[in-house]
Image: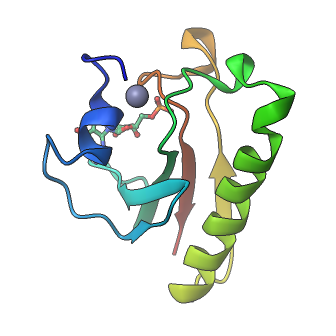
Amino acid sequence: MPTDCLFCKIISQEIPSPLIHQDEKCVAFADIHPKDSTHLLIVPREHIATVADATEQQEPLLGHLLVTAKKLAQQKNLKGYKLQFNVGKEGGQEVFHIHLHLIGH
Ligand code: 5GP
Ligand code: ZN
């Protein structure tokens, strides 16, 4: 794990943050600057910097993030929601550890 990765530190709880979901492949926690009443980040335990760096071998992991987001949206009774990956600096990505935004109300 890169020692300077914020999300790796949240996953390991080196930076304590309440985890809303955790399983063997990913965790989810609230975004610190929410864009709606629900704004979660679904983050793979494996450090991958961006979707652009993901390999075909990681296809099931990326799918798992989407299915986890769907389940969390159902648990929170969201009527509709946005799922977003920002990819690369020019794509608005600020934290270089893949994360799926789940935004809705
Ligand atoms: P990105 O722009 O990389 O797609 O999204 C990064 C997200 O991480 C932003 O929405 C930002 O608010 C969130 N974020 C940045 N630092 C922290 C933090 O320390 N804790 C949490 N929970 N979220 C953070
Ligand atoms: Zn990381």
Residue closer to the observer: 64 or 42: 64
| Picture layout, residue 62 above or below residue 67 | above
Q: Is residue 101 left or right of residue 15?
A: right
Does the rendering let one see residue 37?
no
Ligand 1 occupies quarter: top left
- Residue furthest to the right in view is 56
- For the N terminus, the image quarter is top left
Please state the horizontal and vertical placement of residue 45, each as a whole percent of the image. 47, 44
Please state the horizontal and vertical placement of residue 79, each as a whole percent of the image. 66, 83
Q: Is residue 64 left or right of residue 26?
A: right
| Picture layout, residue 96 above or below residue 99 | above
Residue 36 figure quarter: bottom left
Give the number of callouts: 0
Residue 85 figure quarter: top right
Residue closer to the observer: 72 or 48: 48
The residue under the point 42% across, 66% down is 22
| Picture layout, residue 86 above or below residue 94 | below
Please state the horizontal and vertical placement of residue 14, each as a whole percent of the image. 14, 40
Q: Is residue 24 left or right of residue 37?
A: right
Please state the horizontal and vertical placement of residue 16, each as a whole percent of the image. 13, 51
Does the rendering let one see residue 20?
yes
The residue under the point 55% across, 75% down is 72
The residue under the point 54% across, 11% down is 89
Colour pattern of the rendering = rainbow
The residue under the point 43% across, 59% down is 28
